Image: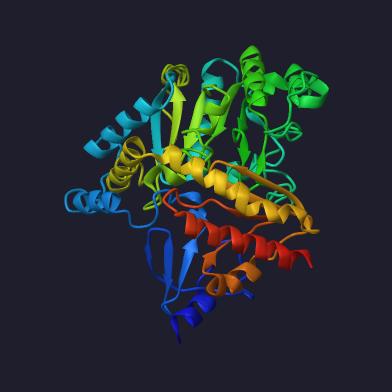
Amino acid sequence: MTPLDFDARHLWHPYTNVLAPGPMHLITKAEGVWLTRDDGGQMIDAMSSWWCAVHGHRHPAITSAMHTQIDTLPHVMFGGLTHDPAIELGRKLVAMLPDGLDRIFYSDSGSVAIEVALKMAVQYQMAKGETGRTQFATIRGGYHGDTWKAMSVCDPVTGMHGLFAGALSIQHFLPRPPVGLTDDWSDDPALNGIGALSDLLDHNARSIAALILEPVVQGAGGMYFYHPEYLRQAQALCRAHGVLLILDEIATGFGRTGQMFAMDHADIVPDILCLGKALTGGHITLAATIASEEVARGIGESAAGVMMHGPTYMANPLACAAACASLDLLASGDWKTNVQSIEAQLRDGLAPAATLPGVRDVRVLGAIGVIEMHDPVDARIAHARAPETGVWLRPFGHNIYTMPPYIITPDELSRVTMAMVELAQGSSR
């Protein structure tokens, strides 16, 4: 049995039918933006391996830090013990985050970071005597992970609510913010979406612990970009009603939108922030939930006194070392200029798709480029064409998109945009 035959027979891939898995590529090496298959062929990783490999694969600074760390302390439990990589990463995060986000809880994946944030919000509200505040509000079109509570705040249509109807917690869903990122903001609450949030909080605030949002860019729920003013006004309403604001920057953090964090577009600071994906430059899994001092102190002064969560691999030293190296690269490099150049080239390269009959919209922000189709796109077609185009794309829903590594060259990016437009042409027929 060949490796690919064994894979097809025994391994379960994400969002894949085990009875008809479709084209599969065996990757033997990754370096920079390139993935090498077992047949020797290469493909540009236009996905940054699900948006995390911002510095490219196998970056020497990150792999060196990991090699050094694995020789001394690959892992140790974080309960009652600590270590230099966790402390150093904490210093770097506190220094790069806005004032007010002070308490860092490490975990091992983005979905778990969301679970931690939701538990923090409930524990904080209970510590304040608000024992009825156990529900959450969010907007349609969002995605916050695949674990149980995280699924409950994902979009009820594009997410997994339908499949798990009756099993997930019932949450409060607001309309997707109707004012797009590049649209003129309307001051009419009935037109800008804030009126719906205001009405919800006026009638239900005493049952809501927090509002959770992906700031400015909604990722896997639809790749929609909305106006930063929505965030500013949403935060003001949350504060007026005693509702915490959780921002999910797992996909958008560390420069992806052209700012270090997407919340910087709105110049706001949430009560709780979730980070992951690019935190380690895509070299190993790690996530963080960062709370304000008020939230942390509220939990600390409660009857329980402790945050009721503790992952086995929390603050894994190897992952923390990788993250320290990744953040050093962001601090010392010119990532912002690179992302601006990528944004400009994505606008030019994807523009021809706007005239195709099957295309609904073309939009770009930072190092994110999206061709939205009228009809769903079959990802298996893109997978099958990847060896021919030399570009690895994984469309989802109606969207053909790219989130390339920041180190991608203009020639490499041209190959990506050409492959995307060609796929849109094929999907338009």
Say whether residue 392 is left or right of residue 98. right
Q: Residue at x 25, y 35 (%)?
A: 82
The image position of residue 355, as x and y in percent, is 77, 54
Camera-side residue of 213 and 156: 213
Q: Taking 298 as reference, is 220 above or below it?
A: below
Camera-side residue of 173 and 61: 61
Q: Quadrant of residue 305?
A: top left
The image position of residue 304, as x and y in percent, is 44, 24
Camera-side residue of 237 and 11: 237
Question: In the rendered image, is residue 147 in sight?
Answer: no
Q: Residue at x 22, y 53 (%)?
A: 70
- What is the quadrant of the C terminus in the image? bottom right
Say whether residue 127 is left or right of residue 310. right
The image position of residue 410, as x and y in percent, is 48, 54
Q: Taking 303 as reference, is 381 above or below it?
A: below
Say whether residue 204 is left or right of residue 320. right
Say whether residue 233 is left or right of residue 6. right
The image position of residue 160, as x and y in percent, is 68, 51
Colouring chosen for the image of the structure: rainbow
**Outermost residue to the top:** 240
**Outermost residue to the bottom:** 1
- What is the quadrant of the N terminus in the image? bottom left
Question: In the rendered image, is residue 43 in sight?
Answer: yes
Q: Total label count? A: 0
